[in-house]
Image (spheres, rainbow, N blue to C red):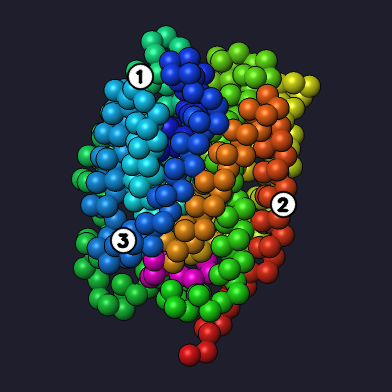
Amino acid sequence: MAIGGSQYSFGHFVEPIKDSFGWSTTQITFSLSMLALGNFISPFVGMMIDRYGSRNIMSFSLAVFGFSYLARVFMSGIWHWYFLSIVQALTVVGSAALPPGKLIGMWFPQNRGKVLGVTVMGNNFGGMAIQPLVAFLVSLYSWKMGYAVIGILGILVSIYSFFIVRNPAETLTASSSDQESLEITPASYTLGDVLKMRSFYAIVLGVVCGSFTYSALLPQVSHHLIENGVTQATAAVALSLFATCGMAGKFLFGMFSDRYGAKLATIIDLAGQAVFAALLVYAGNGIPIWLIVPFMGFFFGAYGALYNLLVLDSFGVKHFGTIMGFVSIAIAVPAFVGPIIAGQSFDQTGSYATAFFITAAIFAMGASVLVLVRTNEALPSR
């Protein structure tokens, strides 16, 4: 919720920040590219989670995330903007990117699609509840008040996580055979195993393509709608609807994944994102936003659960943190390139249309490459 609320709210800060400091849209959105840096520490964070569990890493990461947003209130130069963006990039990995998949895979091995879908609804709830609040505060007071609220929320969630989060090994007193039954997976591959598999590289490429949704599309949706003639209040309501439908997408696609597998679910999801990312160009300018935004939110939201489930289904939960950490290195590409595509599209053409069309084509390519994935691939010869 805390991380998702900040991402959904990004577009509400663009114009106020431009007015306060005179920075261009490209300079502002380039801060989103800093998120790519967090992906490079993902393998280390993933190994720490596999070895020591999630609680301390989650709590520390969320605390730093909160304080970094509070610090934005005092920034006065663009280097402050970029430095704090780098700090936030390093905290997302240990708070929202890696721990949920590991924890849900361990606690709920037989219906993890549905449960992970419910868990990552927090991201959409942030868009549904936090984003309108931030939009209201920015319009009524200032961008500083919006950042302060996000920072305080991060700190509160950090404290909550420290007292709530547990790993099965910390609380269960079952025999070793019962503990092993927590992992009902087709196989439990090591990092060395998966690096020899063609399916691993197909998944990496598919995840890279799907992850453009977070960098080249989501942060720009509200700004895009406003530029298409939608009022800021209406854009905030539309983003809330976008997030609400994303919650439905997570739950329904999670159930579909439990029954038919994460591979098929992810292919369908990326195909849906491709169609509605292209149609989103015309939302509010020829096509009613209430027709396009809900469907785009539905498919967008589902992806947040599916790419974790795809890795879990393919490689097991035991070394999920380490394997997902290495997959996350590749996500640095869309995290870095996506905001640049979006910023250049707007600065050069006055619209995000070019960026959205490019993103739609990338989604279609991701859906195509995932056809090559074999979710029960045999262990490679040693």
Residue 137 among magenta residues: no
Does label 1 or label 3 sit earlier along the sequence?
Answer: 3
Label 1 close to label 2 by CB (< 8 Å): no
SS state under label 3: helix
> Label 1 crowding class (10 Å Cα cut-off): few <14, some 14-19, many 20+?
many
Q: Amino acid at mark 2?
A: Ala
Which residue is disc 3 drawn over? 49
> Is 257 rendered above or below residue 334?
below
- Quadrant where the N terminus lies? top left
| Secondary structure type for disc 2 | helix
State the mark number for residue 364: 2
Q: Which label number is shown at residue 116?
A: none
Residue 51 or residue 101, whichever sits in front: 51
Quarter of the figure with residue 25: top right
User: How many other residues sit within 10 Å of disc 3, few (<14), some (14-19) or many (≥20)?
Assistant: many
Q: What's the distance in space between the residues labelled 1 and 3, CA to CA?
A: 34 Å
Upstream in sequence: badge 2 or badge 3: 3
47 w.r.t. 81: above or below: below
Separation of disc 1 and disc 2 at Cα? Answer: 39 Å
